[in-house]
Image (cartoon, rainbow, N blue to C red):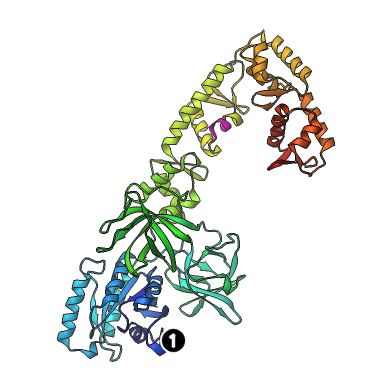
Amino acid sequence: MILGTAGHIDHGKTALIKALTGVDTDRLPEEKRRGITIELGFAPLLLDGVGTIGVVDVPGHDAFVRTMLAGATGVDLAMLVIAADEGVMPQTREHLMILSLLGVCTGVVAITKSDLVDADWIELIAEDVKKLLRGTPLADAPIVACSAVTGAGLDVLRAALTAAASLTPDRSPADFARLPIDRVFTVKGTGTVVTGTLRSGSFAVDDEVRIVPDGSASRTMRVRSIESHATAVNHAEPGSRTAVALAGINRSDISSGSTLVRAGDSWFESRVLRADVTLVHGAKSLGIRTRVRFHLGTAEIGARIVAAVGKVEAGKPVPVRVVLDAPVVARSGDRFVIRATTPTATIGGGVITDAHPPVRRAKVWPAPCADAPTRLGWIVSESGTTGVPLSELPVRIGIAPADVAGFVARSKSVVIAGLRAFDASLKDQLSARLLAIVATHHAANPMEAGLPLDRARQLFGQRSELIDQVMAELQAKKKIVVRANILARAGFAAATNEGDADRLEQLALALGRAGTRPESVEELAKIYGPDTLRLLRMLEKQKKAVAVAVDRFFSPAAVRELLSALREGVPDGVPATASQLRDILGVTRKYLIPFLEYCDRQRISVRTGDLRTFHWNA
């Protein structure tokens, strides 16, 4: 569990943490010299009945709000610090706004430096604080007056923190592991070390991990050792301050703002996000060309906010598309903050509703604040016949991997085929279309037993797992039958025609006479009738014809002749142009190109641009 501090500069956050934990979180010489916190500081705090929680000390100066955001993201509860001698100040308000935007709804208010004022003044400050908190998630937070110098009120503050922490639910370790990196350094004898707050999941010593975003998506490294609250551990649990020593990567290859993840988890690098954005009251509207700074975890990135309505106005959540200047690692449900660039100020924030849209110009969702089942329906509907891999849903929907199967199964608008989720209405459409295709095939080919399964899948162009499921259900309903890889309508019997035998023989002889220059189907139909294509298909099944193209059949002898000429004229593995192959075969392009494309389909050749390579010994 993580406790994050917030408050104006020089209101005593660091001194209060030292009084509670015994740890001075100002570790940099510059921080000591100037008396302010510049970078994030960390300390362990032991609370009776709760255990050790991590404390993140954030800077209060306006120039360091970016660092404050990096520390505040991922905290479970907040300690808003307000000095008794100054009261509510500008950064107090901005930090409280940031905590609200990030969804931090549990916390305690500490009125520090109480030894510098009298009791009546503290009561006035407390009234101001109550007004400040009104209408925010911390409206009911306890307010405790205390002093880091005299120790007054520290026991009451500790008790209030214990009560708040006991109300905060634990995070499950059975999730994808994610550690946003806020520091990177090298330790002699240990190597590269990264630190951060473990947002979800867990890490163990010897785990294979990777850094994202990263130009080399396949690069992995090993967890050499782990520390949590300055103690060596074998496992890091979610919600803990964690330092991970990595084997297989240099410090220069990692930057703050990156994320450490487990190698096998399905995290994505995204430049486009769907989200619900809310601008704070008083913020100027955002147009499509308005540039903002996007803060997510420890990352800060330039971005544009695109809404379907054109502009984002203050006061209510608006569904948008966030277009980023650089990739991030995000998850639906993550909260973020946006800041204006000129002048620099926090202007709003939001919640990610789809962390990995399929295309850069993905349409924004039709409504804000949609629940997970609704967003799942939108995602699978958008995916069409491709479907959505189940492995993507923990990130795109924002649920634990173990919950995916049950979550999808409860949705009436979604079906699972193989390892993908599809729109349930699509299955009904495919069933009707499949029955129509089978009926059309029977009408056009009454003497054939049915439609070959491979041909049916080609006609659909859908993923085979969904088609196979549709076929299985139609078979169970006794609407179709599948025998020997042939698909037919239930009860269908192929017709017979004694006159076909003569025409089949004539066609086979015609193909043999034509050799490597056969007529097209259309030309043959003028001689052998309108059902010539059906007869040619029958010859193909009898292995007396080869469908080199949809409209041109060769005799098997002609195919062997052409392949033999190619084998003699084109060495194995040596690329050749179409012109060179035409000279070898001695045929015109009308016959050459269909035959070469046939070779490509049969994997006899591999085409690369204008060149083809034959692999005779494969």
- Name, please, the residue furthest toward the left: 120
- Name, please, the residue furthest toward the bottom: 150
| Number of dots carrying numbers | 1
Q: Tell me the magenta residue range.
A: 457-461
User: In which image quadrant can residue 118 be found?
Assistant: bottom left
* Viewer-closest of 503 and 93: 93
Q: Position of residue 66 (x, y in %)?
A: 39, 72
Q: Is residue 435 visible?
A: yes
Q: Quadrant of the C terminus?
A: top right
Within the magenta stretch, is there residue 459? Answer: yes
Q: In the figure, is residue 396 to the left or right of 93?
A: right
Q: Position of residue 138 (x, y in %)?
A: 26, 69
Residue located 56% across and 30% down the image: 459
Q: Amino acid at mark 1?
A: Glu
Instruction: Name the dominant secondary structure of the magenta segment.
Output: helix
Q: Is residue 48 visible?
A: no
Q: Position of residue 474 (x, y in %)?
A: 49, 29
Q: In the figure, is residue 141 to the left or right of 594?
A: left
Q: Position of residue 312 (x, y in %)?
A: 31, 55
Q: In the figure, is residue 610 to the left or right of 192?
A: right
* Viewer-closest of 307 and 245: 307
Within the magenta stretch, is there residue 554? Answer: no
